[in-house]
Structures are given as C-alpha cells and as structure tokens.
Image (cartoon, helix red, strand yellow):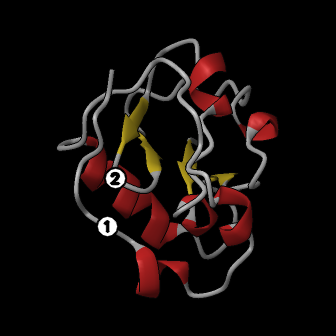
Amino acid sequence: MTYVVTENCIKCKYMDCVEVCPVDCFYEGENMLVIHPDECIDCGVCEPECPAEAIKTDSEPGLEQWLKINAELAKSWPNITQKKDAPPDAKEFDGVAGKFENYFSPEPGEGD
C-alpha cells in the first residue's frame, strides 16, 4: 500500500502534507502535487493533513489511474519539502468536478 494524490488537489495544491512527510516523497507540478510511490513509507501522516482530502491509499477502488499518474510525474517533477502558500483561489476549486479534464497541467512546479 502507498498513498496517492488524487484529482481534488488540482488547482487547490495545499501543501500541509509536504510539511509533515518524514521521507520527502512529494513532487510539485504547476497546479498539483504527487507522491512518489517507491519513496512513500505508508506512514499515513499526510492523509489527515490535506484540507482538500485529496490524498488516498492506493488500495481504495478506482485509484489505479492516480497511482500511475503519481508514479510517472514524480519522475520528472521537482521534489518539494517545504510548505508554500496555496493558490489564492484554492478554496473556489475545492470539490469542483472534472478538474483533471479541465484544469490539469503536466508542467512541473518550482520545487524547493
């Protein structure tokens, strides 16, 4: 089991999870974060820290796509270990349907 970042992170990109991760397995994209599944130690401290409830265990049904997305993007996006401010419109996008189709960006973020 590992943890994955799912669709609701898109355009919310809260970074409370980054701050508590003991192994620094988060990677930053332009408008979301991902977890490197090979680096995650399955401790679970990140999951309750996410205000958007976008972090799930990969054992939940229907998350195969997100495990693949996290694994692929963690290879090319920069590592992030320090919390930054969320986008100013993050609350407006929390819970919006169709975020992957309408707002996802494959571009990397800044990292640390």
How many residues crowd around disc 2 within 10 Å: few (fewer than 14), some, or many (20 or more)? some
In the foreground, 112 or 47:
112
Please name the amino acid that badge 2 sits on. Answer: Glu
Q: Residue at x 43, y 77 (%)?
A: 103
Numbered circle sitting on residue 51: none
Q: Are marks 1 and 2 in contact (CB under 8 Å)?
A: yes
Vertically, is 17 above or below 91? above
Q: What residue is shown with label 1?
A: 105
Numbered circle sitting on residue 30: 2
Which structural element holds mark 1?
Answer: loop
Asked if residue 21 lies left or right of residue 26, the reply is: right
Vertically, is 107 above or below 99? above
Q: Residue at x 49, y 14 (%)?
A: 23
Please name the amino acid that badge 1 sits on. Answer: Ser
- First in residue order: circle 1 vs circle 2: 2
Which structural element holds mark 2?
Answer: loop
Residue 89 placement: quadrant: bottom right
How many residues crowd around disc 1 within 10 Å: few (fewer than 14), some, or many (20 or more)? some
Q: Position of residue 48 (x, y in %)?
A: 82, 37
Vertically, is 100 above or below 89? below
In the foreground, 2 or 92:
92
Q: CA distance from mark 1 to mark 2?
A: 6 Å
